[in-house]
Amino acid sequence: MNKTLKSILSLILCVCFVFALSACGQQNNDAATDNTDTTVNSNTAADGNTDDSAAGTPEESTAGDSNILVAYFSWSGNTQQVASWISDKTGGELFRITPEVEYTEDDVFDRAQDELNNGTRPPLSSHIDGEVMAQYDVIFIGFPIWWYDLPMPVWSFLEEYDLSGKTIIPFFTHNGSSSGASSVSTLEELCPDSTVLADNYFSYAGSNVGAAESAVDEWLIELGYKN
């Protein structure tokens, strides 16, 4: 093999190696993205949106004026948008599940995983009076899929109240886990004395949630809860 041919072969091998590294890096990044159902960059939040609007207008009090509660956890605003539509269309009262220590763009990815792995129930900054909670017959519970499961603030919320006899209806936004991964079975475990509509959840990709209103309408009509 002459020197020129060796040089050409060496160049080809180097190019192939660079492409392999690039593909591997992309694969690992995609896996991490699906694990948290989040694309964490300078502008993207944990339910896959580019607008962190959920932090601005939390619903932190309820009056028990409806027998329907729409409780949700949202970091970027995607799940909040779906919750707002559900509230408007059912007459349900909105309640935002808010941890005392908010997630940030710097810590949301690792913190969400650590909390799930360690079973950490973060304390919440707002609560519903027990007598008010008792008046709700139906609870729509909303969340983004984080690390294939419920975000831990939702665990904190569900374990705080006696939800016996209530109907629990899941809705969630995702970045790949359209079936909710382990989240729905976790809901059933956390609410053993409730009726969890495990086969009638609402699921929508966070990146397209702005176009989800008609799908929310159809879902609520099928459930029989649309005004």
Image (cartoon, rainbow, N blue to C red):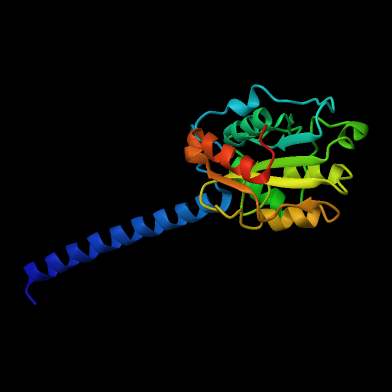
Q: Position of residue 99 (x, y in %)?
A: 74, 35
Question: Can the viewer see residue 204 in this picture?
Answer: yes
The residue positioned 7% from the left and 67% from the top of the image is 4
Q: Position of residue 138 (x, y in %)?
A: 78, 41
| 148 relative to 34 in the view: left or right | right
State which quarter of the image contains the N terminus: bottom left
> Which residue occupies the foreground of this view, 23 or 15?
23
Q: Position of residue 37 (x, y in %)?
A: 55, 48
The residue positioned 64% from the left and 22% from the top of the image is 56
- Residue 57 location, quadrant: top right
> Which residue occupies the foreground of this view, 153 or 200?
200
- Residue 198 location, quadrant: bottom right
- Residue at the extreme bottom of the image, as rendered: 1
| 188 relative to 83 in the view: left or right | right
> Which residue occupies the foreground of this view, 205 or 20?
205
Q: Position of residue 34 (x, y in %)?
A: 52, 52
In this rendering, the answer to whether 31 lies above or below 4 is above
Q: How many marks?
A: 0
| 136 relative to 9 in the view: left or right | right
- Residue 216 location, quadrant: top right
The residue positioned 54% from the left and 44% from the top of the image is 204
State which quarter of the image contains the C terminus: top right
- Residue at the extreme right of the image, as rendered: 131
Question: Can the viewer see residue 151 in this picture?
Answer: no
The residue positioned 83% from the left and 26% from the top of the image is 65
